[in-house]
Image: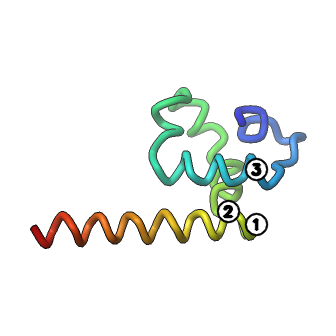
Amino acid sequence: MADVMFKEDVKPDDRSAVLIAVACHAGLLKANFCPEELRQHKKRIQPISQSEILATKATLDAIRTMQAAATIAVTCH
């Protein structure tokens, strides 16, 4: 995963793109990688995490749906 995020010559496969997208949107990249590295490679990481790869898009849609449901559940109680 680090190679895909930090090395320009490594092409992301579907699996890596989905993992990076999930980790990015769940805040797990900040917990597991050096903030300086993440800032340095932001231009590479951002497009991967917002990829139009079908599996990535579906995964992100599911995450957003779960986040919205959790927000509603918390605010309704």
Please state the horizontal and vertical placement of residue 69, each as a whole percent of the image.
Answer: 33, 70
Quarter of the image holding residue 74? Answer: bottom left
Whole-percent x and y of residue 51?
A: 71, 64
In terms of sequence position, does the residue under pointer 3 or pointer 2 come before the other? 3
- Looking at the image, tell me whether mark 3 or mark 1 is earlier in sequence order: 3
Q: What residue is disc 3 on?
A: 15
Q: Could you tell me residue 57's position as x and y percent?
A: 65, 69
Q: Quadrant of the N terminus?
A: top right
**Disc 2 and disc 1 in contact, CB within 8 angstroms:** yes
Q: Nearer the viewer, mark 3 or mark 1?
A: 3
Q: CA distance from mark 3 to mark 1?
A: 10 Å
Q: Is residue 41 above or below residue 71?
A: above
Residue for badge 1: 53
Question: Is disc 1 placed on a helix, strand or loop?
Answer: loop
Q: Residue at x 54, y 49 (%)?
A: 24
Q: According to the image, label 2 marks what residue?
A: 56
